[in-house]
Image (cartoon, helix red, strand yellow):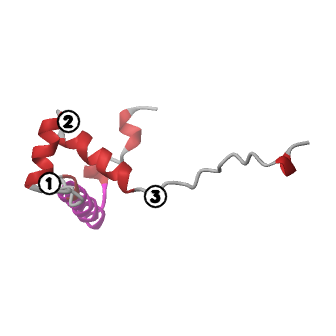
Amino acid sequence: MRLEDLCPNFLNLLESNQLAFVSSYRKKRAADLVPVVKERDTSKIDISVSEDELRKLLGLTKREYLQLKLLAATPKEEEEEDVNDEAFEA
């Protein structure tokens, strides 16, 4: 397949088809050239001054401190206790 076969010759198109082609090309280029705006992370958690001092004393980065804080805040699953009951022994 040759490059000439991929698109019809613009000069051989009817005037209405030329206008439609130019119009669609302009819309496509306008969409391509729209600047991409990066969204900021709104889930950022700020820590208090006392927590920041504690973090520095422990030698942790802010990220590490927040991970530990989230880990401590998650509910723990109840651990099954080993039952040392004679009734359960075979």
Disc marking residue 75:
3
User: Which quadrant of the structure image shows residue 89?
Assistant: top right
Q: How many marks?
A: 3
Q: Quadrant of the C terminus?
A: top right
Side (left or right) of 55 relative to 83: left
* Mark 2 or mark 3, earlier in chain: 2
Q: Which residue is mark 2?
A: 60
Name the spot of residue 46 as percent of width and height, x first.
15, 56
Q: Is residue 27 magenta?
A: yes
Q: Which three-letter amino acid code belongs to the residue tagged 2?
A: Leu
Residue displayed at 17% across by 56% down: 40
Q: Nearer the viewer, residue 69 or 45?
A: 69
C-alpha span from label 1 to label 2: 38 Å
| Helix, strand or loop under label 2 | loop
Give above or below for 86 relative to 24: above
Residue 8 location in percent, x, y? 36, 48
Which disc is residue 35 wearing? Answer: 1
Tell me the crowding category of disc 2: few under 14, some 14 to 19, or many 20 or more residues within 10 angstroms, Cα based: some
Magenta span = 13-30
Q: Is residue 1 one of those drawn in magenta? A: no
Q: Furthest residue to the right? A: 90
Residue that appears at 25% across and 64% down: 15
The quarter holding residue 58 reads top left
Q: CA distance from mark 2 to mark 3?
A: 23 Å
